[in-house]
Image (cartoon, rainbow, N blue to C red):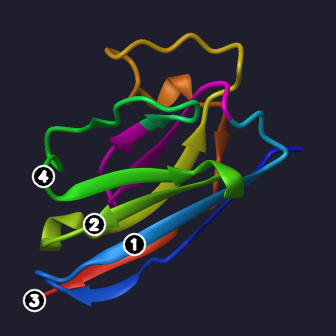
Amino acid sequence: QVQLVESGGGSVQAGGSLKLSCAASGYAYGTNYMAWFRQAPGNAREGVAAIHTAGGRPVYGDSVKGRFTISQDNAKNTIYLQINRLKLEDTAMYYCAAAGPWTIITLGTVLDRDKYNYWGQGTQVTVSS
């Protein structure tokens, strides 16, 4: 049974930083992409960053390039999302997701939520002025 457990969310002032973590268990780590998504109330779930668990260049959504950094620790089956220079509009629930080994993902679809088979419960990030 695949489990993804996020942590690291919280309340922070604009301009601050946070580092989110997502620990995967029961997942075939190294076989496909894992990603971070976010969803603000009333908005669609948005892909913000993805990384192949076997390595390779990360991919970022346009709205977060230059401020968000996705990374991983293969020994811990964990991915991270470093968020810098937080903005009010970054307020959202942040979800970790993982694609099954059978899922075909291209660079053009790597931030599509439909490509991900497993999801965590989310961790809330709230940015205040």
Q: CA distance from mark 4 to mark 3?
A: 21 Å
Q: Nearer the viewer, residue 86 or 39?
A: 86
Q: Label 4: few (<14), some or many (≥20) within 10 Å?
A: few
Residue at screen point 42% across, 64% down: 93
Q: Residue furthest right?
A: 1
Residue 66 on the magenta segment: no
Which residue type does callout 1 highlight? Lys
Residue at screen point 70% across, 25% down: 100
Q: CA distance from mark 3 to mark 1?
A: 19 Å
Q: CA distance from mark 1 to mark 4?
A: 15 Å
- Can I make out residue 31 in this image? yes
Relative horizontal placement of residue 107, taking residue 124 as reference (left or right): left
Q: Which residue was labeled with disc 2?
A: 83
In the displayed structure, 19 sits above or below 122; it is below
Rendering coords of residue 50 (x, y %): 41, 38
Q: CA distance from mark 2 to mark 4?
A: 10 Å
Which residue type does callout 2 highlight? Ile
Q: Which residue was labeled with disc 4?
A: 66
Residue contact between numbered discs 2 and 1, judged by CB atoms under 8 Å: yes
Q: Which residue was labeled with disc 1?
A: 19
Secondary structure category for the residue under label 2: strand
Residue stretch rendered in magenta on the structure: 30-50
Dot 1 or dot 4: first in sequence order is 1
In the displayed structure, 39 sits above or below 51; it is below
Secondary structure category for the residue under label 1: strand
Quarter of the image containing the C terminus?
bottom left
Q: Which residue was labeled with disc 3?
A: 129
Which residue type does callout 4 highlight? Gly
Dot 2 or dot 1: first in sequence order is 1
Residue at screen point 59% across, 60% down: 22
